[in-house]
Amino acid sequence: MTGDRGAAPMRADARRNRERVLKAAEEMFAEQGIAVPLDEIARRAGVGAGTVYRHFPTKEALFEAVIAGRVEALLADTDRLLADEDPGTAFFHFFDHKVRQASLNKALSDALEASRGVRYGSPRTHESFWRLVDDLLAGAQRAGAVRPDLDRDDVRALMVGCIRAVDQVTDPAKVDHLIQVMTDGMRVKHE
């Protein structure tokens, strides 16, 4: 599938090459982020650069295709969290989990950091992800667990900041500590 509606089905070899490019891109974007050159992705996939460009006319298009699968998984996880009985626990679990995932995957980190300007996947996927974030945040605020003065942009900025901080340490206890410090700042203070 090329993403074009009504397009002729891909030949089996073209489909295999596309999958090889996506797999190589996913690995390399996870390691290096969007800065990785397309020629290196082609080399790892075992195809020529022209093959990459036939399927993905720009590096951004390839990045969006790779990150779309990750975002779909995040959506499924966030949907599950919305059903949680305790909205505060769901929100903080979401924040912690996404920070840990993005700190291990440079592509997710880049997508999160650029999410105000870059659409990863379809616009529906992008908007669905942030609508679910809004729902988690609103539920946690209604439950009195998260400060009422925070909004989606604040949460995104705090997540990116926490990812950057976590990237600076190797001790798992320090990672836990940094995430706890960040989440404590979002909690409602009860006197």
Image (cartoon, rainbow, N blue to C red):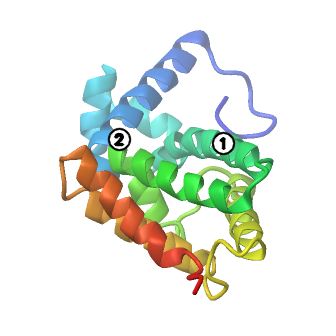
Front one among 36 and 175: 175
SS under mark 1: helix
Say left or right for 83 vs 97: right
Mark 1: give few (<14), some (14-19) or many (20+) Cα within 10 Å: few
Q: For the residue marked with disc 2, what is the amino acid?
A: Ala
Residue 149 vs 174, above or below: the answer is: below
Give residue 9's position: percent from left, percent from top: 72, 22
Q: Quadrant of residue 153?
A: bottom right
Query: Above or below — where is 21 with respect to 80?
Result: above
Chain-order first, disc 2 or disc 1? 2
User: Residue 146, located in which quarter of the rendered image?
Assistant: bottom right
Number of numbered callouts drawn? 2
Q: Give the image location of residue 138, x and y in percent.
A: 75, 72
Horizontal and vertical percent for residue 85?
79, 51
Can residue 128 be seen here? The reply is yes
Q: Is residue 36 visible?
A: no
Q: Which residue is mark 1?
A: 77
Percent across and percent down for residue 58 are 44, 51
Q: In the image, 139: left or right of 19?
A: right
Cα separation between marks 2 and 1: 20 Å
Q: Quadrant of the C terminus?
A: bottom right
Residue found 65% across the figure and 71% down from its top: 145
